[in-house]
Image (tube, grey):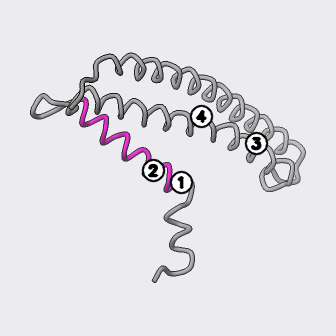
Amino acid sequence: MELSGSGEAENSPARLAARAEDAVRALSLRTSNPVDGDILASPGEMHEVLGSLKLLVDNLSRCLPEMATWLEQCLWCGRVGGQDPRAYGEVAESIFEVASALARAHRMGTALSREIQAAQSASSDLMVSD
């Protein structure tokens, strides 16, 4: 039986991001230094990997604007920044910089997703019936 709160910690945004990072690192290690020279089992597996990576990038890109919105709402609700007008201005400027960077990352992620989709589409020409 799961204790109350332990599932929340396991599914916290930070923990979920760490698990995604672990999976991508393992894939990177697998493809960068294969011991036996075989990175993938077949072009079909590459097609599957590209499809999964496209979905990963799509989902990552989708959450970036949401994080910026959340941060801006925290500023407006007073959860960050404090009461000092000077501190508020500095925090607001930092939040603007974060939101701008996340917007750029969202655009780059969308472009990356399109390129991965193009690679996946082209890889379908390489697949043969197993």
Q: Which residue is mark 2?
A: 18
Tell me which numbered mark, 1 or 3, is placed earlier along the sequence: 1
Residue 106 in the image: state x and y as whole percent: 63, 29
Looking at the rendered image, the quarter that the C terminus falls into is top left
Residue 64 in the image: state x and y as whole percent: 64, 38
**Which residue occupies the extreme left position in the image?**
36
- Residue drawn at x 11%, y 34% is 35
Residue stretch rendered in magenta on the structure: 14-31
Residue 129 in the image: state x and y as whole percent: 24, 28
Q: Which residue is mark 3?
A: 69
Q: Is residue 2 above or below residue 13?
A: below
The answer to which image quadrant residue 128 occupies is: top left
Q: Which residue is mark 4?
A: 61
Tell me which numbered mark, 1 or 4, is placed earlier along the sequence: 1
Q: Are marks 2 and 1 in contact (CB under 8 Å)?
A: yes
Disc 3 marks a residue whose amino acid type is Thr
- Residue drawn at x 45%, y 83% is 1
Indicate yes or no whether the magenta region holds residue 21: yes
Q: Which residue is mark 1?
A: 14
Mark 4 to mark 2 CA distance (whole Å): 16 Å
- Residue drawn at x 77%, y 52% is 80
The answer to which image quadrant residue 28 occupies is: top left
Q: Secondary structure at mark 1?
A: helix
Q: Secondary structure at mark 4?
A: helix
Mark 1 to mark 4 CA distance (whole Å): 16 Å
